[in-house]
Amino acid sequence: MQSATQTVPASRMSLWAGRILSGLVVAFLLLDAVTKIIKAPQVKEAFARLGYPARLAPVIGTVLLVSVAFYAVPRTSILGAILLTGYLGGATKLNLRVGNPLFQTLFPAIFGALVWLGPFLRDDRLCALIPLRTSEADL
């Protein structure tokens, strides 16, 4: 059974922009996960400031690492984006709870939007599911 909506393949530029953006997201989140897993000094300090025991850092880092792994594999990237959205939503809530400054509070939410922008630019099916522009037929 075919879909009623026709999708146009992503342009070459859009495809590469999505790949590069997703690669940057993966690199940043991998660094974040590894620092949590090894309990880097700045992670211990941040956990203490946020009111979480440092012993949870490796657990949270492992959850992030698994989510990033799903995101990095093209076949499971949407599942990874969903998992990362939950993770980053929790980070936003935590920053709100402790009363961090506005940018620090909104950074995870902004980063969450970037998590979805990569697959959106790469995958024409996702573009069809979330149409951000009107088609010529709608005009």
Image (cartoon, grey):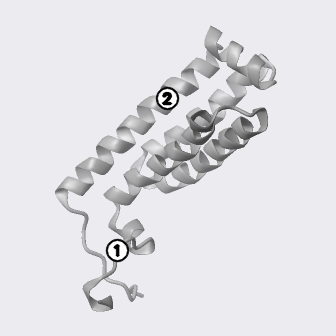
Q: Residue at x 25, y 56 (%)?
A: 14
Q: Residue at x 42, y 30 (%)?
A: 27
In the rendered image of this protein, does residue 13 appear above or below residue 138?
above
Q: Amino acid at mark 1?
A: Arg
Q: Label 2 to label 1, Cα distance in Å?
A: 33 Å
Direction from residue 50 to residue 132 in the image, left or right: left
Q: How many marks?
A: 2
User: x and y percent of residue 118 in the render?
Assistant: 38, 51
Direction from residue 8 to residue 87 in the image, left or right: right
User: x and y percent of residue 109 in the render?
Assistant: 57, 46
Identify the disc placed on residue 30.
2
Closest to the observer, 91 or 78: 91
For disc 2, the neighbor class at 10 Å (few under 14, some 14 to 19, many from 20) is some
User: x and y percent of residue 45 in the render?
Assistant: 70, 13
Q: Nearer the viewer, mark 2 or mark 1?
A: 1
Residue 26 at least partly seen: yes
Q: Quadrant of the N terminus?
A: bottom left
User: x and y percent of residue 61 in the render?
Assistant: 63, 28
Q: Quadrant of the C terminus?
A: bottom left
Q: Earlier in the sequence, mark 2 or mark 1?
A: 2
In the rendered image of this protein, does residue 69 appear above or below residue 36?
below
For disc 1, the neighbor class at 10 Å (few under 14, some 14 to 19, many from 20) is few
In the rendered image of this protein, does residue 58 appear above or below residue 8?
above
Residue indicated by mark 1:
133
Direction from residue 31 to residue 133 in the image, left or right: left
Pointers 2 and 1 in contact (C-beta within 8 Å): no
In the rendered image of this protein, does residue 128 appear above or below residue 44?
below
Residue 40 at least partly seen: no
Q: Amino acid at mark 2?
A: Leu
Q: Quadrant of residue 128?
A: bottom left
Q: Determine the secondary structure under disc 1.
A: loop
